[in-house]
Image (cartoon, rainbow, N blue to C red):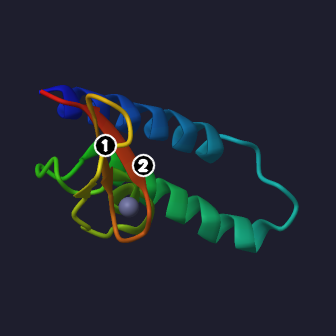
Amino acid sequence: MGADKQGTEHRLEMLRQLKEKYNQPDPPEVLKNKQAKADIYQQILRAESPPDDPELCLDCWVYHGERLKMVAHDSTEYGIDIFRCANDHERRAKHK
Ligand SMILES: [Zn+2]
């Protein structure tokens, strides 16, 4: 399952970036920052427990908590399938 593996790598990369953001020292505007940290923390939790449906958009799930299906588009490159969600996140997967 090539798409699954690619999805996992993408998810781990998002997780890495979120944790990095979360662990950054607090900037001066503390109140605003607390809310932002709470949001990032929720995103980390979601990135750690992805939906079991591989057709759902990972970005939407992690960043917004939305369960949007990725829809296949015409492939522009040979052997590559392009999927897109309603929020225009894109995922490319090799043909199986
Ligand atoms: Zn999306």
The residue sitting at 61% across, 37% down in the picture is 20
How many numbered tags mark residues here? 2
Q: Position of residue 77 (x, y in %)?
A: 37, 34
The residue sitting at 21% across, 64% down in the picture is 69
Quadrant holding the N terminus: top left
Q: Quadrant of ligand 1?
A: bottom left
Q: Are marks 2 and 1 in contact (CB under 8 Å)?
A: yes
The answer to whether 60 appears left or right of 35 in the picture is: left
Residue named by callout 1: 48
Q: State the residue lying farthest toward the right.
A: 28
Q: Picture quarter containing residue 72?
A: bottom left
Report the front residue among 6 and 73. Answer: 73
Q: Find the distance from the CA under tag 2 to the CA under tag 1.
A: 6 Å
Vertical arrangement, residue 50 with respect to residue 84, above or below = above
Vertical arrangement, residue 86 with respect to residue 16, above or below = below
Q: Amino acid at mark 1?
A: Glu
The answer to whether 10 appears left or right of 26 in the picture is: left
Q: Amino acid at mark 2?
A: Ile
Residue named by callout 2: 44
**For the residue labelled by badge 1, is the local secondary structure a helix, a strand or a loop?**
helix
Q: Position of residue 92 (x, y in %)?
A: 34, 39
The answer to whether 88 appears left or right of 45 in the picture is: right
